[in-house]
Amino acid sequence: MLEFNATFFIAMISFVIFMIIMNAILYKPLDRIVRERRDLIDKNNLKAKIAQEKTDILKKWQVSSMEKAQKSSRETYQKILNEYKAKKDAIIENEKNLSRKEIAIAQAETQSEVIEAKHELKEEVNILADIIASKVLGW
């Protein structure tokens, strides 16, 4: 059987002292190191989560900025295109009007030349008719 003598109590006291010393020397520092590492990991995870959220926000901002820039570029391009089309149409209309005026002037000149040519032909026909009539009639 088990005897409870002084050796047993000394062994028990020395074991308790050994556990206290081991706790102070080994277990508390290890527990502190594990806690510090866990805190560091948690802190780094939190920083990573915050950085990811910032990145997501920046990506959304970038996408919206790109969309705004594209929309603005399209509007500017369309505006410039419409201005040039309007200028082109105005130039074409102006040239058409000038061409019409030139055609009208040319037609008027041609008409006056036709009338003048008819007058000259009438005079020549009258002269020729007088010559023919005088030869036929013998005058």
Image (cartoon, rainbow, N blue to C red):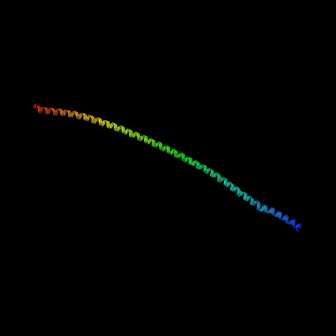
Q: Is residue 36 above or below residue 108?
A: below
Q: Is residue 28 above or below residue 70?
A: below
Residue 66, horizontal then vertical, whole percent: 54, 48
Residue extending farthest to the bottom is 1
Which of the two residues, 103 or 80, is positioned nearer the viewer here?
103
User: Which quadrant of the structure image shows residue 15?
Assistant: bottom right
Residue 12, horizontal then vertical, whole percent: 85, 64
Which of the two residues, 46 or 126, is positioned nearer the viewer here?
126
Q: Is residue 35 above or below residue 77?
A: below
User: Relative to 44, is 110 on the left or the right?
Assistant: left
User: Relative to 50, is 68 on the left or the right?
Assistant: left
Q: Quadrant of the C terminus?
A: top left
Residue 91, horizontal then vertical, whole percent: 39, 40
Residue extending farthest to the front is 136
Residue shown at the point (52%, 46%) measured from the top left: 70
Total marks in image: 0
Residue shown at the point (54%, 47%) measured from the top left: 67
Q: Is residue 94 above or below residue 10?
A: above
Residue shown at the point (47%, 43%) measured from the top left: 78
Residue shown at the point (65%, 52%) measured from the top left: 49
Which of the two residues, 125 or 58, is positioned nearer the viewer here?
125
Residue 68, horizontal then vertical, whole percent: 54, 45
Which of the two residues, 68 or 26, is positioned nearer the viewer here?
68
User: Relative to 99, is 73 on the left or the right?
Assistant: right
Q: Quadrant of the N terminus?
A: bottom right
User: Which quadrant of the structure image shows residue 82?
Assistant: top left
User: Relative to 88, is 3 on the left or the right?
Assistant: right
